[in-house]
Image (cartoon, helix red, strand yellow):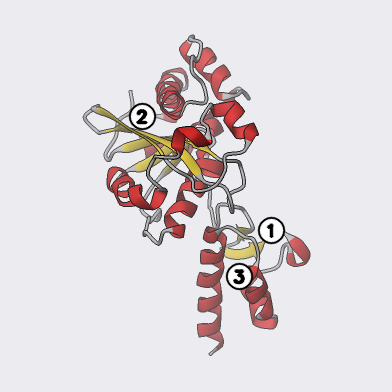
Amino acid sequence: MLKLTKPLAFIDLETTGTNLGTDRIVEIAIVKILPDGTRSVKRKLINPEMPISKGSSDIHGITDEMVKDAPSFKQVANELKQVLDGCDIAGYNSNRFDVPLLVEEFLRVQVDFDLKSRKLVDVQKIFHQMEQRTLSAAYKFYCNKNLEGAHGAEVDASATHEVLEAQLEKYPALGQTVDSILKCIGEEVIVDFARRFTMENGVEVFNFGKFKGRAVSEVLKAEPQYYDWMMKGDFPQHTKQKLTEIYTRTMLKKA
């Protein structure tokens, strides 16, 4: 059993597509587990204010018609922030998709959603280190059950919680706390969720383009116009936010 010192929120998103910079949430489910074991569920359909791609509709079954009268993310942002207040966050492939896209949505509507004090547990990372499978296969492998209704946000978030509980039983080395799990599998150092920057020896470096491998601050000092180019480009809001933090810090040191 998980031993929690603070709530752990399992999240799952269904979306218009897979582009972190341009796609939107159409459904969110949050399965929140409290330290005393109490479990609560929050699920919402969301009007993405843009068309849902056919490829995405074919996967999760949510159509434009189904969300046309649903609230926009802006209308539910504060409610979702309150639900997640004080929670660590878990999910399946969540560090690379669900959390980054959720952060983008909060940034877009200018609601401050701080991740600095939160632990992020990606159950897929445990599974891939141990077994290399999909969520449905993980559910079958660890829970010995077929995942009925896969790609429904609540079903997937609940299944992810069950998988994590089963992983704790199967792999005693994981311990029973969020800290012990992350100590075992390693905690990612994330600069921006789109991975345009990485951290090397305590310094942010570019992870793409002509400056790949070079310190961001070094490039911005020499070519400050590169900051303007990125800010005008089709990069995710979180990437631009982190770029601005580095740029501001760099310019203050330069002055």
Camera-side residue: 55 or 218?
Answer: 55
The residue under label 2 is which amino acid type?
Gln
Q: Position of residue 170 (x, y in %)?
A: 46, 18
Of pointers 2 and 3, the one earlier in the residue sequence: 2
Cα distance between the residues tagged 1 and 3: 16 Å
Foreground: disc 2 or disc 1: 1
Is 237 positioned to the left or the right of 168 in the image?
Answer: right
Of pointers 1 and 3, the one earlier in the residue sequence: 1
- Residue pointed to by mark 2: 176
Of pointers 2 and 1, the one earlier in the residue sequence: 2
The residue under label 3 is which amino acid type?
Met
How many numbered circles does the render carry? 3
- Residue pointed to by mark 3: 231
Task: Find out whether the residues at labels 2 and 1 contact each other: C-beta distance under 8 Å.
Answer: no
- Residue pointed to by mark 1: 207
* Label 2 crowd (10 A; few <14 / some 14-19 / many >=20): some
Is 37 positioned to the left or the right of 9 in the image?
Answer: left
The residue under label 1 is which amino acid type?
Asn
Q: Going 45% across and 59% down the picture, which residue do you hit?
A: 107
Q: Going 49% across and 48% down the picture, which residue do you hit?
A: 49
Cα distance between the residues tagged 2 and 1: 34 Å
> Which label belongs to residue 230?
none
Q: Position of residue 215 (x, y in %)?
A: 66, 69
